Image (tube, rainbow, N blue to C red):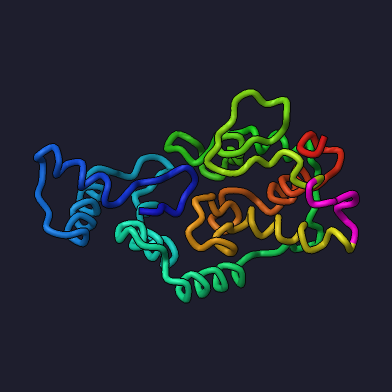
Amino acid sequence: MQAQQHNFWLPVAGLASALVVLGCASVDSSADADKLTQQMVQASFRDQGIAKVDRLKQDENNAACSAADASGKPLDAKVSAKLEADALKAVKWPSDGKFVGDWKVGEKIAQDGRGMTWNDKPGATNGGNCYNCHQISKQEISFGTLGPSLYNYGKIRGITDPNSAEAKAIVEYTWGKIWNAKAYNACSGMPRFGHNGILTEGQVRDLVALLVDPQSPVNK
């Protein structure tokens, strides 16, 4: 199951299959395994604080990718293209037209993994938790590898002035990728930071700066 919120992942067939191996349940098909898993998940979670059970509900995109995962086959190309196009249309571009913020603030957001847990207060500021999946700078000695290294992100792409016309396309892509990664890869495992309200527009702007500003440690 591809969840719709920050740092939340539940493999659909894997859980039920493991129980079958352990003799806890018996299923006849992947559809039965999926149904069993859905029942187990619904029975195992409860609302607590700001963490509500509705986080388990899948939208069209997550449901399609979960079904593909369970079948062991890639998502149909036409379905993938439609989902990506719909996601791209839903990207909210900066209301003031400014894509690049303060990389120093962006660095703090990238290194902050707090937020969206049951004991966080409603409306509390969330972190981006970027370090958990990506290398961000050469100074880091501990980082996740679920995503590609972001070190030299802007430098590799030849960005010398992130506000220039030459940088416009990659800067806009960077914004869109952070806002909703599924606009470029339907089954991306990257959280949909803007789309799901994990980060604010201002936070996304600062993360873009972290990636594209030549003065950022990302590009040093």
Range shown magenta:
156-164
- Using residue 60 as the reference point, say whether residue 139 is left or right of it: right
Quadrant hosting residue 67: bottom left
Could you tell me which residue is drawn at 20 percent across and 46 percent down?
17
Q: What secondary structure predominates along the stretch shown in magenta?
A: loop
Which quadrant is home to the C terminus?
top right
Q: Is residue 159 a member of the stretch shown in magenta? A: yes
Q: Position of residue 93 (x, y in %)?
A: 71, 64
Could you tell me which residue is drawn at 16 percent across and 60 percent down?
29
- Using residue 163 as the reference point, say whether residue 91 is left or right of it: left
Q: Measured along the vertical axis of the image, is residue 33 above or below residue 143?
A: below
Q: Measured along the vertical axis of the image, is residue 213 above or below residue 163?
A: above
Residue nearest the observer in this picture, 59 or 79: 79
Could you tell me which residue is drawn at 61 percent across and 43 percent down?
148
Q: Position of residue 101 (x, y in %)?
A: 80, 48
Quadrant hosting residue 76: bottom left
Q: Position of residue 198 (x, y in %)?
A: 56, 49
Q: Position of residue 65 (x, y in %)?
A: 40, 61
Residue nearest the observer in this picture, 185 or 77: 77
Q: Is residue 49 a member of the stretch shown in magenta? A: no
Could you tell me which residue is drawn at 42 percent across and 66 percent down?
75
